[in-house]
Amino acid sequence: MQNPNTQYFTTSEFAKICGVTKHTLFHYDKIGVLKPEFMGKNDYRYYTMKQFYQFEVISILKEAGTPLKEIKAYIQDQKPGYFISILQEKQQQLEKERLKIESMEKLLTSTIQMTNDALNASYGIPSIEMCEEEYFITMKLPKPKNDREVLIRIREHFEYCNKLHFYCELPFGCIIDKATLESGNYTYPDYYSNKIDTYHDSERLHIKPHGMYAILYHKGSYQDLTSSYEMLMEFISQNNLKLSGNSYEKDMLSYLAVDNPQEYVIKISIQVDAI
């Protein structure tokens, strides 16, 4: 027998109070997450104010990403310790999602800025630029070139960065060692690199030093880079400069934005000193 002092709500009334549809309540009843207080004539469902608070608990856990199966187990055995453990687990998951969202926001912002810079750059004109210290996570490339091995290392590189929650710019950049530059070999880099926003203690960390760099914005395919390197090396020689470090290639406009390789824009920066 129902308590005569308790106010009961029909399914429609209770659904409106909870801000859901009747079908949601029917589903919760069917799977045993939230059953009505009692069934009336003609199988009408009736709910109570107490069940509104149960519904709120269900909503909080569901919003946190808790599966209905776990919510059902908790509703059937409500204990503070169990409730805390569920929320702490979801809190950790939300923190991971927050880091992902922050990384994506940074990625979008930097890519927009980089693309605008590429569109407004002066192509094929060498110049000097003072650069601040920058940080990269690098992946050493196999020699001789082996496409299969490169792809395997790229996949492992992505997994490494994701595991450590590194924010990395896309696409890859490239680094050519000073010794490779001095040998006149500009066609195949020594490292792929991803720029990161802050210093990280990693065995793959590479620090691009603060200092003076000879730069050139190359417009065209990767295969045509040699002519831009030769132009930049001649500029260095004619301006009483000498190589003092590596070359850094940054894809400003690439396959992410255009499908014609002749429209690619690549910024080449070579560390130099005055003679």
Image: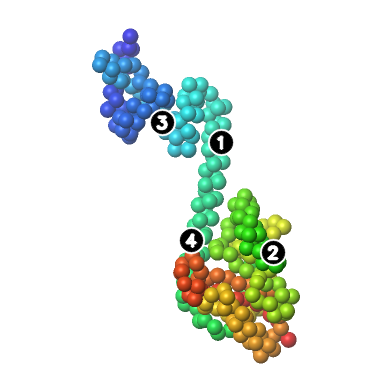
Mark on residue 56? 3
> In the rendered structure, which amino acid carries the disc numbered 1?
Gln
Sequence-first tag of 2 and 1: 1
Badge 2: how crowded within 10 Å, few (<14), some, or many (20+)? Answer: some
Residue 28 falls in image quadrant:
top left
> In the rendered structure, which amino acid carries the disc numbered 2?
Pro
Q: Mark 1 highlights which residue?
A: 88
Sequence-first tag of 3 and 1: 3
Q: Secondary structure at mark 3?
A: helix
Q: Nearer the viewer, mark 1 or mark 4?
A: 4
Of residues 54 and 20, the one nearer the viewer is: 20
Residue 190 rendering spot, x and y as whole percentages:
68, 68
Residue 57 falls in image quadrant:
top left
Q: Mark 4 highlights which residue?
A: 108
Decide if residue 51 is in sight here: no
Badge 4: how crowded within 10 Å, few (<14), some, or many (20+)? Answer: few
Mark on residue 142? 2
Q: Secondary structure at mark 2?
A: loop
